Amino acid sequence: MHSMSQVPGNSAAFRQALLLSEKQRITAVILFVGFFTLLIFSRIFIFGSTMSRWAFLATATVATIEILALRSVNKALQVSGDVSPTVWYFTITLETLFPAVGIAFMTSSRLLPDYRPLATPWALVFLPFIFLSVLRLNTRLCIFSGITSAVAYVGRILYRVAARFYAEWILRYTDCCSNVLDHLHPERISRWRCSSANP
């Protein structure tokens, strides 16, 4: 029996082991996405959560792409072939963007904006995908998975900060314009406010 150090990275045996490990990983991803879909369904329709129903479209998209990737892996195993690296990098990017997009756009509106990234179930989706990346027997893919996960999480934080800053800037700009108008035309503004309050 050969040790791992004696098996070359481009050998047929290593490629088969990589595909078998990837098959297990993709199967686990599909099962997890299915479980998460049931969790979203129960929160929305049983417990009355205000989570965005676009989450069903997001989970369906991820599940469909993962099933297609699984079919590619199965075909490669049958003919002792290989799968294009583009498929691996695309699925990694999809899996890392999935929870980040969910946190940014599909959280419950009942949660305070400052607590949404922590209180939403979407925040827990990062960990399973990162743990499952261990089943990739490729150092570059594992590093790429970690980097894209970190970038997606930081990007989600920056999006929240930018959105909050933009909202505060709009509020201050509106107040400033209102004060200028009050100062320039106080009588007209007061008449307009009275007419709006008493149509």
Image: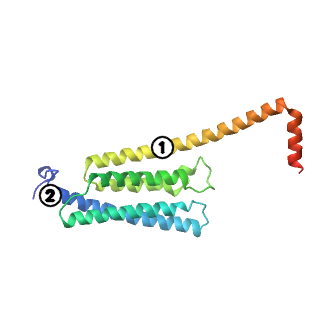
Q: Residue furthest top?
A: 184
Tell me residue 187's x, y (percent): 89, 34
Disc number placed over residue 12 in the picture, else none: 2
Q: How many marks?
A: 2
Image quarter (top left, top right, bottom left or bottom right) of the N terminus: bottom left
Q: What residue sits 31% from the left and 49% below the top?
A: 142
Describe the element under mark 1 as helix, strand or loop.
helix
Q: Amino acid at mark 2?
A: Ala
Residue 174 located left or right of residue 99: right
- From the top left corner, tell me how far across and down residue 132 is, in percent: 34, 56
Looking at the image, which residue sits at the far bottom? Answer: 46
On screen, residue 101 versus residue 11, left or right, reads right
Q: Earlier in the sequence, mark 1 or mark 2?
A: 2
Where is mark 1, residue-wise?
155
Q: Which one is nearer the viewer's eye here, 191 or 130?
A: 191
How far, Cα to Cα, is label 1 from label 2?
Answer: 39 Å
Q: Observer-nearest residue: 30 or 73?
A: 73
Q: Amino acid at mark 1?
A: Gly
Left or right, 93 with respect to 39, comes to left
